Amino acid sequence: MRILVISLFTISTLVAACGAKKGGSGGLGDGGVPSDAAGDGGLDPFGRKPCTSNGNCAATEFCSVVGECAASGSCLAAGDCSAPQTCKSSRTCLAPEACKLTTDCPTGQECNASGACVIGSMCGQNKFGLTKIAPNLLILLDRSGSMNGDAGGDSRWNVAKKAVETVTKAFDGQIRFGLATYSSCLAGGCSAGSIVTPIADNNASAINNFLAMTTDSGSQDGKALDGNGKIRYLCDSGAPETSTGKALSALVGAPDLQDPLRANAILLLTDGEESDQCVADCNGSCGAKRLLDQAKSVKTFVVGLGVNSATIDQIAKAGGTNASVSANSQMQLNAAFSQIASEVATCEYALDSRPPDATNLSVFFNDVAEPLARDDVNGWSYDPGTNRVTFKGKACTDIKNGTVIDIDVVFGCPQPVVL
């Protein structure tokens, strides 16, 4: 929509340039300003006669509240109309939703043949495209020798593998997953871990393909192959291997977890307390705090498999997630991973372009005409810095559970855009 703005100075100049005459009935007075032939005080710069009552105006006119004569049926100000009518751009008293010209309608709407303001082509074009911003979540698995212990009829390592497969497949489109393990099974023990599958979009297959090649048997270096060509992945060097603090500290500043465009977090799974020999420099709580205190903060969620949560709660608290989650079986571990993934998954969307005026945005779910409240409790907020809309509380829950299947973010039109 093109808007032409012409100042009063420009109008006066244009009129003066079009053969202005002095004097004469209906002519122009000095300076190009219309004069009044009746000599009763002159017309204003717009050619309207000043008045104090209807008696000062012609029979087909009335005295507007602004003190100027106006044609019957028109208006110059809101006070010329009787509620609920308002004085529209067309200088006509009309109901709020009625119109004579498109300029009578709110931005993004147009006047149809029936004289009603409806969503117009420009409004349709101002329904923003949305891109969901998936957060990063690095799963960090303890691979110490004790992970071959029992967890409800299977080894802890196999239970962990199945839980990772379940959660990554369930949340693959909502979370960008990566996988790291610790320690690195180096001579002397207490080594930090490493990222074995970098964080990426739709990464479930890559992560699970890697884990499928590992077994719950151990080797000194965690690289030896068994008779089936699979990796004996657990550390069995005889040295202390539960180096949680070192593993977390090593991830401080890791590029995978420093994505400036999205939230970054770690899901730590361990089956026991840290080895005493591994905490001299920095224990798990220390590592989690270092991650949280970065300029680009990283939270640490903690799951204990077959371990008393009281021994690892401090890691979760230092990592900004309050408490660890305990699990002793496949079902419990699946539930723990799903609970954390649901908390990590955000309801943040990037708009494909910037709105001209952030205060004139409206959001609608499932084409329902009532707009969603703009609030931080159960509604939405807009961040002009990132050009993103974030849904909160119930609104976010409804998106996650599939209740909401259509989201309209519209500029200028307080109505959903129904295609």
Image: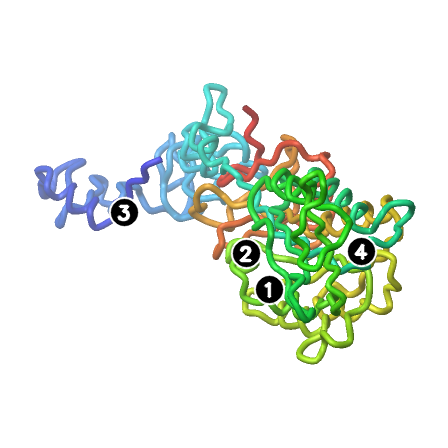
Determine whether, in the image, residue 90 is placed left or right of residue 309. left
The CA span between labels 4 and 3 is 91 Å
Q: State which tag comes first along the sequence, 2 or 1.
A: 1
Residue behind mark 1: 251
Residue behind mark 2: 256
- Mark 4 against mark 3, which lies toward the viewer? 4
Residue behind mark 3: 44
Residue count near mark 4 (Cα–Cα under 10 Å), binned few <14, some 14–19, many ≥20: many
Q: Position of residue 409 (x, y in %)?
A: 55, 39
Residues at badges 2 and 1 in contact (C-beta under 8 Å)? no
Determine whether, in the image, residue 49 is placed left or right of residue 383. left
- Mark 2 against mark 4, which lies toward the viewer? 4
Q: Quadrant of the N terminus?
A: top left
For mark 4, give the secondary structure.
helix
Residue count near mark 2 (Cα–Cα under 10 Å), binned few <14, some 14–19, many ≥20: some
Q: Quadrant of the C terminus?
A: top right
Amino acid type of the residue tagged 3 in the rendering: Asp
- Mark 3 against mark 2, which lies toward the viewer? 2
